[in-house]
Image: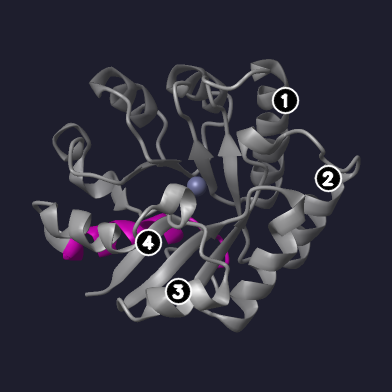
Amino acid sequence: MFYFDAHCHLQNKRRFEKAKNLHLKYFIVNATHPDNWEEVFQASRVMPEILPCLGVHPWYIDRLPIHWVNILSQYLNKNPNIMVGEIGLDGTKPDLVHQADVFESCLKLAQIYKRPVHIHGHKAWMLISEILSCYPDMVFVLHNFNGNETMVRRFLKLKNAYFSLMNSRRFAIIPADRILVESDSPDKNRRLENVIEVGNQFGCGWKQLDRNFLDFFSHFPDGLRNTPKGLFRW
Ligand SMILES: [Zn+2]
């Protein structure tokens, strides 16, 4: 059995060392803007527990360099272990049209390079499910999922949906084999320990969570560097 964090922002070395003391084995670390892509990428090279994602968070769609799609494309092309995230939509922020535009550019790259995506969908789950229905093969994690049962059913119509949770409230409405847990730390001062506590409350235990985590990575054609070997389907 091992502990993991399916969504965080722990590219800072000092913070990361603290996290390791909690015996977490894998961290999916999401960059949020071209300004921190290189930082996350470099962190994953020196700290192999970090599984890197590069993307544009819907809060940070302004000030994008003009060639940002090209730059992201190059990262993905050169590094088969990089995933796409944090991307998505936020219904509480302005400019949903621009957000959707940036989101779709990221999804298209993920589709081209066959990478999973990590999605922020605060108050926008319906719109996200509509957009994702145009990408039926996409493997995706819905980060800090807080939708209702109807939304769960909509996402499950797509075959590769995973739901990442920060508390136990939705354990009952999501199939046990699609649940991941996360801390989202250090965002908004969120505690990393929370991920272990939430996992401990899951009825099927960490064993099932581990299986889900590995299952998620089995969708990679080439596997992921640093994930346990022999667990990939292809
Ligand atoms: Zn986040």
User: Where does residue 227 sit, x and y in percent of width and height?
Assistant: 45, 74
Whole-Å distance between the Cαs marked 3 and 2? 28 Å
| In this picture, residue 44 sits left or right of residue 112 | left
* Magenta part of the chain: 206-223
Residue 212 magenta? yes
Looking at the rendered image, the disc whose residue lies closer to the viewer, 1 or 3, is 1
Q: Which residue is mark 1?
A: 101
Tell me the residue that label 3 is attached to.
227
| CA distance for labels 2 and 1 | 13 Å
Q: Position of residue 214 (x, y in %)?
A: 36, 63
* Left or right for 97, reference 68: left
**Image location of residue 130, percent across then percent down:** 51, 18
4 or 3: tag closer to the N-terminus: 4
Instruction: Report the disc number at residue 68.
Output: 2
> Mark 1: which secondary structure?
helix
Task: Name the residue tied to disc 4.
Answer: 5
**Main SS type for the magenta part?**
helix
Mark 4 residue element: strand
**Going from the N terminus, do you reach mark 3 or mark 2 first?**
2
Q: CA distance from mark 1 to mark 3?
A: 32 Å
Q: CA distance from mark 4 to mark 3?
A: 13 Å
Number of numbered markers: 4
Mark 3: which amino acid? Thr
Q: Nearer the viewer, residue 23 or 188?
A: 188
